[in-house]
Image (cartoon, rainbow, N blue to C red):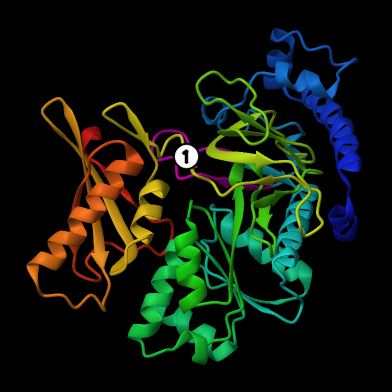
């Protein structure tokens, strides 16, 4: 199955997608009251469905999942459901995702593919430091590593000292976690007197669940591991395993025999051409328990449909630029944290740890960017600190087209995360 997936050409991929699109639309029409109603209202001709007709299908949103809580979107009899994952539900009903045995098996295969594309083999020791439980991150990579035949350490998140001890004593060669936690582990290793390049054997990082920048990759590959790879997924689409960076690291290959991807204008829903930036909408082609049609991920990216230098024809998405719900609108300008991270990375003396605080000064929005200086920034002269702060403020203004105040903080004064980093404090919402 894996070898066939890697060797598929563009024509073969498109033929498979055309066939599977009709199958999944027919299946949800026959088995899901929610989608049957939606498709009828949209005037979709199921019997004569063509691939291009997918654009006539209404989008599915997270609100649809919450409104049909808990299992209103399944397309099989409840007796076939063997697993359910769910979001935290902090803002209302959680979003529940249901799996059949076939879905679990396919999910394991997708994560196996992702690990293989990163260069992971059965000889590796894979430490999974994503959360387990209702969050899909841990189990997805766990299944993939086991299916590959690698040794798995199901460390989950937290207990950083133990994580480092396990890495050292058990010879971890592959680390799967969020990029922000990988940075924290790297920082903590040095505090524990561990030289990652000498005392650890980390070859590969499989890092996802939050947007991250090339500057973060640079820091991790210089200080902690040999090769850091971005992995993409979300619970509604199975979990991790939707897309992965190959060794060329020029975008994330989407497994197009399982997912049909469209890039849309987040405001109008218009489908954009490859190369244009927009929100990603995904149709699941193989999911049995709870297939989704044109699911709006809220993730902003760019689709590249050219064959990769690695030889795989599966289309690539560029690194996620941000989420529409993480986007800050400040004085009418759209700002993504990843833009600020890239600016910070261009300055010597600063760490990758930062925090954005948005507030109001009367009717006007105000942005404060807090950034830690590095341990080797030894300057005790006020003029040097002020100069660095001023240069960073000027660069942010040029990139963002708005002014932002900068506060330089001492090392290790900003919050660390053992899961997803909390970069934004928006006081306007309080």
Depicted 44 relative to depicted 76: above or below? above
Q: Is residue 86 magenta?
A: yes
Is residue 354 rendered to the left or right of residue 79? left
Q: Is residue 36 above or below residue 164?
A: above
In this view, the residue in front, 213 or 31, is 213
**Number of marks in the image?**
1
Q: Report the residue at 58% width, 88% height from top.
A: 170
Determine the main secondary structure of the stretch shown in magenta: loop
- Could you tell me residue 428's position as x and y percent? 22, 34
* Position of residue 296 measured from the top left corner of the image (x, y, whole percent): 58, 31
Q: Secondary structure at mark 1?
A: strand
Residue 227 is drawn in which quadrant? bottom right
Residue at image position (53%, 87%) is 200
Q: Residue furthest left?
A: 382
Q: Nearer the viewer, residue 358 or 151?
A: 358
The question of residue 232 being in magenta is answered with: no
Front in this rendered view, residue 11 or 60? 11
Image position of 313 with respect to 40: above or below: below
Q: Position of residue 410 (x, y in %)?
A: 19, 69
Residue 272 higher or lower than 403, as above or below = above
Magenta residues (range): 83-96
Q: Residues within 10 Å of mark 1 (few under 14, many from 20)?
A: some
Residue 30 seen in the figure: no
213 to the left or right of 28:
left
Q: Which residue does the numbered mark 1 point to in the structure image?
A: 323
Asked whether, in this view, residue 194 is left or right of residue 110, the answer is: left
Q: Is residue 19 visible?
A: yes
Q: Is residue 153 left or right of residue 342?
A: right
Residue found at x 64% / y 55%: 250
| Residue 92 in the image, given as x and y percentages of width and height | 41, 33
Q: Quadrant location of the C terminus?
A: top left
For the N terminus, which image quadrant? bottom right
């Amino acid at each position: 199955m894996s070898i066939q997936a890697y060797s598929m050409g563009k024509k073969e991929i498109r033929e498979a997608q055309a066939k599977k699109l009709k199958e999944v639309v027919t299946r949800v029409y026959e088995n899901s009251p929610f989608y049957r109603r939606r498709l009828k209202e949209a005037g979709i001709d199921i019997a004569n469905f063509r691939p291009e007709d997918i654009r006539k299908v209404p989008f599915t949103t997270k609100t649809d999942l919450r409104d049909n809580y808990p299992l209103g979107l399944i397309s099989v009899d409840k007796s076939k459901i063997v697993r359910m994952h769910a979001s935290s539900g902090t803002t209302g009903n959680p979003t529940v995702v249901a799996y059949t045995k076939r879905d679990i098996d396919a999910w394991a295969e997708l994560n196996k593919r992702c690990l293989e594309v990163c260069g992971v083999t059965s000889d590796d020791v894979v430490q999974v430091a994503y959360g387990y439980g209702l969050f899909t991150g841990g189990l997805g990579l766990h299944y993939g590593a086991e299916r590959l035949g690698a040794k798995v350490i199901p460390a989950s998140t937290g207990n950083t000292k133990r994580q480092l001890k396990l890495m050292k004593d058990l010879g971890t060669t592959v680390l799967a976690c969020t990029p922000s936690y990988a940075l924290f582990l790297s920082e903590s290793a040095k505090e524990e007197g561990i030289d990652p390049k000498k005392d650890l054997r980390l070859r590969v990082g499989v890092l996802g669940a939050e947007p991250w920048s090339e500057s973060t990759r640079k820091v991790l590959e210089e200080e902690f591991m040999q090769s850091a790879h971005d992995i993409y997924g979300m619970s509604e689409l199975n979990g991790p395993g939707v897309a992965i960076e190959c060794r060329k690291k020029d975008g994330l290959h989407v497994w197009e025999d399982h997912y049909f991807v469209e890039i849309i204008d987040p405001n109008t829903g218009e489908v954009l051409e490859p190369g244009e930036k927009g929100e990603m909408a995904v149709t699941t082609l193989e999911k049995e328990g709870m297939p989704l049609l044109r699911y709006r991920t809220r993730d902003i990216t760019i689709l590249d449909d050219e064959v990769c230098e690695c030889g795989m024809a599966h289309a690539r998405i560029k690194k996620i630029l941000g989420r529409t719900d993480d986007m800050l609108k400040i004085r009418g300008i759209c700002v993504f944290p990843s833009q600020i991270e890239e600016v910070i990375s261009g300055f010597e003396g600063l760490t990758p740890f930062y925090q954005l605080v948005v507030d109001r000064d009367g009717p006007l929005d105000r942005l404060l960017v807090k950034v830690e200086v590095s341990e080797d920034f030894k300057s005790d002269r006020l003029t040097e600190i002020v100069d660095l702060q001023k240069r960073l403020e000027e660069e942010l203004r040029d990139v963002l087209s708005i002014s932002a105040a900068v506060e330089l903080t001492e090392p290790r004064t900003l919050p660390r995360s053992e899961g997803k980093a909390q970069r934004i404090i928006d006081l306007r919402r309080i």
